[in-house]
């Protein structure tokens, strides 16, 4: 690693004049970016940060788009689970010395499975709410989605309460 004492200030000045970034100059000279920064500060020079700012802005947009894609997938999975919460439920196992497969079809999922579905949907609801709070675009659409999920929660919770109160605990 090149130290400040052996730093090639003249070469750095030429590279700076060509518009290279601090990191690019450091890579070219085989020294640490902090060495180049210190030299530039002492020489009264600065680096154009507009490319860095643009890159950060683009990365921020990419991350926001990724969060929205993930939220859409979470929403679709949660909605699918909520839509099937009262469907028939297949239970099965493999066992015995013969490794026998056995299955049984229940009229609906056990209460603990339904509770897990509602918990998963609740987590999705929470995450979507946080994404909406961070976003200033598509607010009406997001609120509509959240209202739909909330109605689904109410309906699922009512069904779960009714099953629990009647003692149906498969």
Image (spheres, rainbow, N blue to C red):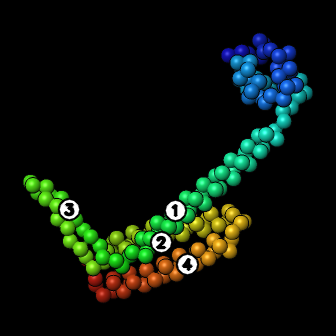
Residue 105 rendering spot, x and y as whole percentages: 23, 74
The reply to whether the C-beta atoms of the residues labelled 1 and 3 are less than 8 Å apart is: no
Determine crowd level at label 2: few under 14, some 14-19, many 20+ residues with C-alpha closer than 10 A: some
Q: Which mark is residue 79?
A: 2
The reply to whether the C-beta atoms of the residues labelled 3 and 2 are less than 8 Å apart is: no
Gap between marks 1 and 3 measured at Cα: 30 Å
Along the polypeptide, which appears first: circle 1 or circle 4? Answer: 1
Residue in view at x 34 percent, y 70 percent:
113
Q: Which residue is mark 3?
A: 93
Gap between marks 1 and 4 measured at Cα: 16 Å
Residue 3's image quarter? top right
Question: Is disc 1 placed on a helix, strand or loop?
Answer: helix
Is 61 on the left or on the right of 85, as rendered? right
Q: Which residue is mark 1?
A: 73
Question: Is disc 2 placed on a helix, strand or loop?
Answer: helix
Gap between marks 3 and 2 measured at Cα: 27 Å
Residue 157's image quarter? bottom left
Q: Is residue 54 above or below residue 116?
A: above
Gap between marks 3 and 4 measured at Cα: 36 Å
Q: Residue furthest left?
A: 97
Q: Which residue is mark 4?
A: 148
Q: Is residue 158 above or below residue 48?
A: below
Is 27 on the left or on the right of 109, as rendered? right
Q: Is residue 129 above or below residue 21?
A: below
Determine crowd level at label 1: few under 14, some 14-19, many 20+ residues with C-alpha closer than 10 A: few
Residue 44's image quarter? top right
Along the polypeptide, which appears first: circle 2 or circle 4? Answer: 2
Question: Is disc 3 placed on a helix, strand or loop?
Answer: strand
Q: State the quadrant of the C terminus.
A: bottom left
């Amino acid at each position: 690693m090149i130290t400040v004492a052996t730093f090639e200030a003249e070469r750095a000045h030429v590279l700076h004049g060509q518009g290279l970034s601090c990191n690019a100059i450091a890579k070219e000279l085989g020294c640490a970016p902090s060495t180049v920064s210190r030299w530039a500060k002492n020489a009264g020079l600065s680096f154009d940060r507009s490319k860095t700012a643009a890159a950060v802005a683009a990365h921020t947009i990419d991350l926001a788009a990724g969060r929205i894609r993930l939220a859409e997938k979470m929403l679709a999975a949660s909605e699918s689970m909520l839509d099937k919460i009262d469907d028939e439920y297949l239970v099965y196992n493999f066992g015995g010395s013969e490794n026998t497969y056995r299955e049984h079809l229940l009229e609906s999922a056990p209460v603990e499975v339904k509770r897990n579905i509602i918990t998963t949907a609740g987590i999705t609801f929470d995450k979507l709410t946080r994404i909406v709070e961070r976003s200033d675009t598509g607010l009406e659409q997001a609120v509509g989605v959240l209202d739909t999920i909330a109605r689904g929660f109410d309906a699922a919770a009512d069904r779960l309460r009714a099953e629990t109160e009647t003692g149906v605990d498969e």
